[in-house]
Amino acid sequence: MKRSIFTLVLLLLLTGSIKAQDNLITNIKHRKTLSLNGKWHYIVDPYETGFYDYRYKELKEDNGDAYWNTGIPANKTAKKEHGYNDKYTIEVPGDWNHQKPEFVFYEGTIWYQKTFDYKKQDSGNKYYLYFGAVNYRADVYLNGKKLGMHKGGFTPFNFELPAALLKDTGNFLVVKVDNKRYADEVPTLNTDWWNYGGITRDVELVEVPNTFIRDFMVQLKKPHGGAIPAKQPEVEGWVKLDHQPSSAQTISVSIPELKLTKQFTTTDSIIPLSFKLPGQVRLWSPQAPKLYRVVISAGTDKTEDEIGFRTIEAYGKKLLLNGKPLFMRGICIHGEIPQDVRRAYTQQDAAQLLGQARQLGCNMVRLAHYPHDEKMTRMADSLGILVWSEIPVYWTINFGSAEVLSKAKAQLNEMITRDHNRASIIIWSVGNETPISATRTDFMHSLITKAKQLDSTRLVSAALEVNYSALKDQNIVDDPLGQFVDLVAFNEYLGWYGGLPDKCRTTNWSTPYNKPLFISETGAGAKAGFHADSLSRFSEEFQEWYFKEQVDMLKRMPDNFVGLSPWVLADFRSPKRNNPVYQEGWNRKGLYDDKGNKKKAFYIMQNYYKQKTKEEV
Ligand code: GCB
């Protein structure tokens, strides 16, 4: 009985109201795939001529003028005003802005085209096109037929490729990518980062058996009451098949290193899992990021993943990792490689960003302000770096709109679905610096509820903000959203936006909520190499002074203070930052500059984190 209620709840969760990517396939790394990365053809189409006719009506699928159709004239007299050739090529993945000088500020539509061959293995199999991320809207066509449309620039999606449409040779794949900003999208018109456009992450053709493992969750059960995990900790999760098999099937979950195999029988397409791990299991932690190979099989399908087992809990004033108090030595990171002025998407990119965070002494990163490439969260798993992962509900999106809420929920769903087996991720964040109002609080509360439904094992938070015009000596972070989050997190820039850094000497922070308190941002701008006295804005000395004062202030934080993630790891591109001497289109609050050099302030934070590490042992 208990199990069937559980199944019903799961069913509701997994087949819920969000249509967009409820059928996301996870764990792509371990599937049979053909990479469609590499050179693609492109057409720049600022007027969307390939999509709308001259009366601005969407073109019919078979209209030869539509850019999803080949553009090859039938004969020499035929008129074609578009086409793809090798003179116009672009790399996938990768934002377009850094690839051609003429695209540096481009926001609009670019059509991508690739021809590929694919030999189908088994006529009963299924085929999907999987995109790691396309910013912002993608309309996808194969051999002249529309497969689907997706919105959201930082989360994955897949469309089924009908087997009859997929040819052995000469498949004509077209993606219309549009990164124009709109008031009713997520994020909205206004952000403090550059809106890089394009197919920014990997593209794969995925082949799976007819009934396949679409997704699974294998995590330790949510802890309660500050408990240390039992010697034989309990796994709770589920396996989600593409559809319910016609006759009962056996699902098996095994962890070879622990000599464990468990079997379950399907009664539905979602199969709840519940079992104990053997006593010799080693829990995952930043000190010992142990991952186990977990193999899941169902009928003819089999997949595996590397999974770490740990618990995380906000208990009273403490944050407990595996039942022990945790202090987060964090840093905020943008998904950008500043020395190349582009989005991050490779393994080396993840190694650079997480490596820099490690040098600073971090055990935690806040991946701002949108889900980063999956390579980042997987690498965080293997390096033992805790992660805060966020959706781009940023500043003043349209909180009154039900449609915007459903867009935010779709991105939340995709973020959590992709990464719910990553041990490193301990916090899902539903947004950043959203202005207090009843409408906003309802909106954010609804996202928090959704996040908890999708994943009961992690914490949910949001970065709250400070009103600098109302600063007092005793500041109380009492944003009403605080009652719904597990961790009260706030951004404060005392000394940069509110007075000068010495303001920290008399300022104190607390929250009325009996919850752990975290500083999710603090930072000041400095142009690397500009040296002056500490009162000079944008000098390295000003930023150094700022962090010294901040660190002194931290010593007076209340006993529920559980860490911070300063803003920001490295300088990043922002069209809002136009000081012609010090910024030139860059937000300069990095502890590293845009070439990877450390600024003076880096060492202040590094020292603070060294001290905190010593206190831990
Ligand atoms: C913030 C935002 C972050 C900005 C930063 C800044 O509070 O969360 O996205 O880039 O301040 O530099 O002002």
Image (cartoon, grey):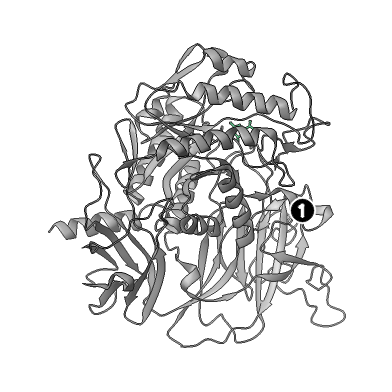
The answer to whether residue 159 is left or right of residue 478 is right
Q: Which of 124 and 617 is in front in this view?
A: 617
- Inspect this view and state whether residue 491 appears: yes
The residue lying at 83 percent from left, 31 percent from top is 581
Instruction: Relative to 109, say whether 332 is above or below.
Output: above
- Which quarter of the picture shows residue 484? top left
Q: Which of 262 and 104 is in front in this view?
A: 262
The residue lying at 23 percent from left, 43 percent from top is 227
The answer to whether residue 455 is left or right of residue 34 is left
User: Looking at the figure, which quarter contains the C terminus?
Assistant: top left
Q: Which residue corresponds to mark 1?
A: 46
Q: Can you tell me whether the CB of the residue at mark 1 lies under 8 Å from the nearest atom of ligand 1? A: no
- Which quarter of the picture shows residue 209? bottom left
Instruction: Relative to 209, say whether 358 is above or below.
Output: above
The residue lying at 57 percent from left, 87 percent from top is 119
Q: Nearer the viewer, residue 68 or 227?
A: 227
Estimate the x, y position of residue 284 in percent, counting from the top left. 37, 55
Instruction: Relative to 556, say whether 608 is above or below.
Output: below
The kind of secondary structure element at disc 1 is: loop
Estimate the x, y position of residue 167 in percent, counting from the top left. 59, 84
